[in-house]
Amino acid sequence: MAVAVAWVVADDFSAACEQWPQFSEDWGAMDHAAYSRAIEGKLVELRAHGLAVKAVAPVRFSEYGPWAAGRGLDPSASGTRSSYAAEQLRTGAAVPWPPRRNEPCWCGSGRKYKMCCTGPRMSVVEGGV
């Protein structure tokens, strides 16, 4: 069985941290770039444990909120995000994962995958830590 992992897009990350207490507890101590790298690590870990991770499902409040409301689901619940990711995968709306090394990263940064979420971390000169 193929799976997708939900990932909150950069434009909605702050709102997710403000509106969803558990999400904030899990991810709120980091910026979006660090969150994306952490999601990449989870994807790799899930695949290493034998799950057929095939995609990342972007969670955009403008689409996700109405989707959850239409099903009577709590949008802050991780299970709801998991269901949304499964639907995104089923409908072809999820971003295939992993990209090839020289393809753009799945996170939407515009950087090559090998130099973004999977590659070397940004240097101090580039604005990283």
Image (cartoon, rainbow, N blue to C red):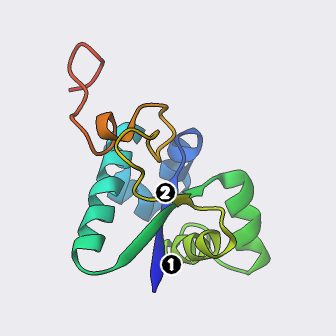
Which type of secondary structure does the marked residue at label 1 adopt? helix
Q: Return the mark for residue 31.
A: none
Q: Nearer the viewer, residue 85 or 78?
A: 85
Q: Amino acid at mark 2?
A: Trp
Instruction: Quickly name the residue at label 2.
Output: 7
Q: Residue furthest bottom?
A: 1
The residue located at (58%, 39%) in the rendering is: 11
Earlier sequence position, callout 2 versus callout 1: 2
Residue 51 lies, in percent from the top left, at 33, 79
Q: Is residue 2 above or below residue 30?
A: below
Residue 31 in view of the camera: no
The answer to which quarter of the image holds residue 115 is top left
Q: Amino acid at mark 1?
A: Gly
The residue located at (56%, 70%) in the rendering is: 85
Instruction: Quickly name the residue at label 1.
Output: 79
Q: Nearer the viewer, residue 30 or 33?
A: 33
> Which part of the image, by quadrant, shows the N terminus?
bottom left
The residue located at (24%, 13%) in the rendering is: 125
Q: Is residue 124 above or below residue 48?
A: above
